[in-house]
Amino acid sequence: MNNDTVKLLRECNAGIKMGTNAFKKVLPRVKSNGMKREIESCNTLHCQLGDRAHEMLKDIGADTKPPHAIASAMSDVKISMQLMMNESDAQVARLMTDGCNMGIKSLSHYMNEYKNASSGARELADELISSEDKLAVKLRQYL
């Protein structure tokens, strides 16, 4: 398997972990049942995509990559601080939308950087980008 495939799958897996960690942090603070359902649905899809990424890496004899420690810590601090100051659904929607946009930008960058990744890895990245985009659009009504 080519190196681009491994790198793209690792980046997808790390991004999925960042997303699911953020979902877990904000869900207890969400008041709207509709918003909660949207985030839970996206979290479920992220977990499924994460399982696929992990399996694909395992199948080619590669390990996973944890999210970058500094990025993960900064995300946790940002979420905690922002929600400490304002625990509204609008604030959660802003945080999640920002996270989705960062995920989309990062994954799009990696798709361009790892052009020789397998079609399966690229398909998984596309599904993840689509998932993030759909959640950002659905959360607009809560801004």
Image (cartoon, grey):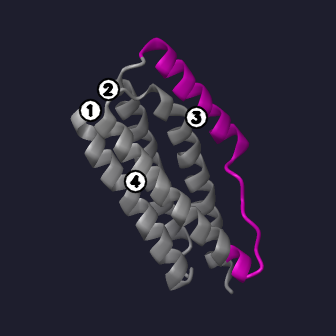
From the top left corner, tell me how far across and down residue 129 is, in percent. 41, 61
C-beta proximity under 8 Å, tags 1 and 3: no
Q: For mark 2, what is the residue?
A: 90
Helix, strand or loop under label 2:
helix
The answer to whether residue 6 shows anywhere in this view is: no
Looking at the image, which residue sits at the far left? Answer: 141
Q: For mark 3, what is the residue?
A: 75
From the top left corner, tell me how far across and down residue 74 is, in percent. 62, 32
Helix, strand or loop under label 3:
helix
Residue 104 quadrant: bottom left
C-beta proximity under 8 Å, tags 1 and 2: yes
Seen from the viewer's position, the closer of residues 64 and 32 is 32
Q: Amino acid at mark 3?
A: Ser
Seen from the viewer's position, the closer of residues 86 and 117 is 86
Q: Is residue 1 found left or right of 82 in the rendered image?
A: right
Calculate the distance from the C-alpha at mark 4 to the C-alpha at mark 1: 16 Å
Would you call the spot at circle 2 few (<14 residues within 10 Å), some (14-19), or many (20 or more)? some
* Nearer to us: label 1 or label 3: 1
Would you call the spot at circle 3 few (<14 residues within 10 Å), some (14-19), or many (20 or more)? some
Looking at the image, which residue sits at the far bottom? Answer: 1
Q: For mark 1, what is the residue?
A: 142
Asked if the magenta segment contains residue 104, the reply would be no
Give the main secondary structure of the magenta stretch.
helix
Asked if the magenta segment contains residue 84, the reply would be yes
Q: For mark 4, what is the residue?
A: 132
Magenta segment boundaries in residue numbering: 57-86
* Nearer to us: label 3 or label 2: 2
Between discs 1 and 2, the one toward the N terminus:
2
Q: Residue at x 72, y 42 (%)?
A: 69
Looking at the image, which residue sits at the far front? Answer: 33
Q: Is residue 77 above or below residue 133?
A: above
